Amino acid sequence: MTVLLNSEIFILTLVIGVYLAAVWLFRKTRLSILNPLLVSIPVLALITHFLGISYESFEKGSRIISFMLGPTVVVLGYLLYEQIAQLKENAVSIITSVFVGCITGVLSVIFIARYFGADHALIASLEPKSVTTPIAMSIAERSGGIPAIAAVVIVVGIFGGLVGPFILERLGIKSRIARGLALGSAAHGLGTAKAMELGAVEGAISGLAIGVMGIMTAILVPVIELFIA
């Protein structure tokens, strides 16, 4: 029985099954707080704990899902191609906005974490909070952080996807490019999913922001640490 519970096919089926059930629940209720990903994480945590499935087994069993995170980001390139004219016209403002967002995101984590007495490993794990999960885990590992902790940046995406559009609306931000940049830069994949619901331009710009934010964060994190170490 233990072998079955820790097998790759069982874990993969469990993850997909729980997520589909969460999607069904969300469609029935339409409550933002019941976001499928937000519901799936604690449910899976409880089930794996109850069944005695180790983290190592769960990670190995769900590796194909982790792998697919990368290609899904690449797929966003099609949306970018459709909005290439918009990108060329606003290239400078896009790069500048993402650069400022990257600096702000990294520095805010460092100073807040240091204020609360966090050690270097934890700070390094949280620095890439504004980039998509696979990139964040890689950056954290190279900076001396813990990839498993870096994976919790998905919470940032969930929060941004839930409240981002509301905040942008309350602030009176109507620019489709600005909305896409904000959601992609701050809430990565889940923010982009929400941006796609707002429109094609928002979705394309948000997808671009994910990639640019990832590159800038990977470059700037070591530089920032060097200057404020």
Image (spheres, rainbow, N blue to C red):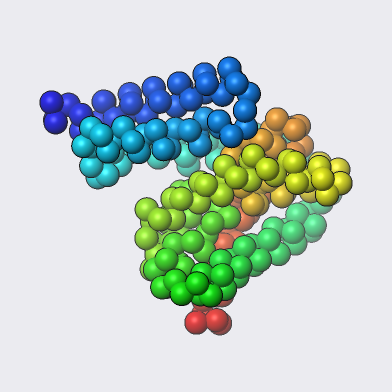
Q: Residue at x 40, y 25 (%)?
A: 18
Indicate left or right for 103 with 69 as reference: right
Indicate left or right for 113 with 107 as reference: left
How many numbered markers are drawn? Answer: 0
Looking at the picture, how far across and down is residue 92, in whole percent? Answer: 79, 58
Looking at the picture, how far across and down is residue 207, in whole percent? Answer: 64, 42
Vertical position of residue 194 compared to residue 182: above or below: above
Looking at the picture, how far across and down is residue 65, in whole percent? Answer: 40, 35
Indicate left or right for 79 with 11 as reference: right
Q: Residue at x 27, y 44 (%)?
A: 55
In which quarter of the view is residue 169 placed?
top right
Quadrant where the image shows the N terminus: top left
State whether residue 61 appears in this view. Answer: no
User: In terms of depth relative to the viewer, which is nearer, 82 or 119?
Assistant: 119
Q: Residue at x 83, y 49 (%)?
A: 171
Looking at the picture, how far across and down is residue 72, in whole percent? Answer: 52, 36
Vertical position of residue 34 compared to residue 21: above or below: below
In which quarter of the view is residue 86 placed?
top right
Q: Residue at x 37, y 53 (%)?
A: 148
State whether residue 27 appears in this view. Answer: yes
